[in-house]
């Protein structure tokens, strides 16, 4: 997977398109990412006790990796991710500015 936790991404498709957010969690087996505060849906929760009062809460659902695009920290542009293998190390690079990400 070309994204990592903490990466800044741009959502390209869906109800939150053109919004930016941080990757909160990765789901490599599903090729999905959880972006904090994006792709929100309502869930009706039953009251359990005084700590968990219940009601309607917002939860964020994972987005497919194909619906998000990494924002390069150097050039601040949405970009594709490439890899540079030099010696025994493998680094992610921005396809637009050719600088190393991380």
Image: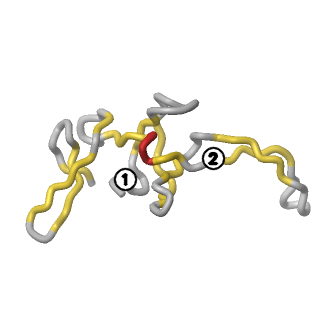
How many numbered discs, if any? 2
| SS assignment at label 2 | strand
Identify the image quadrant of residue 83: bottom left
Disc number for residue 3: 1
Q: Residues within 10 Å of mark 2 (few under 14, many from 20)?
A: some
Give how far across and how far down residue 101 sits, in percent: 25, 50
Give how far across and how far down residue 97 sits, in percent: 17, 38
Q: Is residue 29 above or below residue 19?
A: below
Query: Whole-Å distance between the Cαs marked 2 and 1?
Result: 18 Å
Q: Residues within 10 Å of mark 1 (few under 14, many from 20)?
A: some
Q: Residue furthest bottom?
A: 88
Give how far across and how far down residue 91 sits, in percent: 20, 58
Q: Is residue 100 above or below residue 72?
A: below
Left or right placement of residue 59 versus residue 38 in this view: right
Location of mark 2 (residue): 60
Residue drawn at the location 89% of the way across and 62% of the way down: 48
Mark earlier in primary sequence (2, 1): 1
Q: Residue furthest left?
A: 87
| SS assignment at label 1 | loop
Left or right placement of residue 17 versus residue 76 in this view: right
In which quadrant will I find the C terminus? Answer: bottom left
């Amino acid at each position: 997977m070309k994204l990592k936790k903490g990466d800044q991404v741009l959502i390209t498709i869906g109800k939150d398109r053109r919004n930016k957010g941080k990757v909160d969690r990765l789901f490599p087996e599903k090729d999905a990412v959880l972006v904090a505060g994006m792709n929100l849906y309502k869930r009706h929760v039953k009251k359990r006790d005084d700590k968990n009062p219940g009601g309607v809460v917002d939860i964020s659902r994972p987005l497919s990796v194909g619906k998000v695009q990494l924002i390069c920290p150097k050039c601040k542009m949405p970009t594709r991710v490439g890899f540079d293998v030099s010696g025994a190390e493998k680094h992610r690079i921005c396809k637009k500015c050719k600088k190393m990400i991380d």
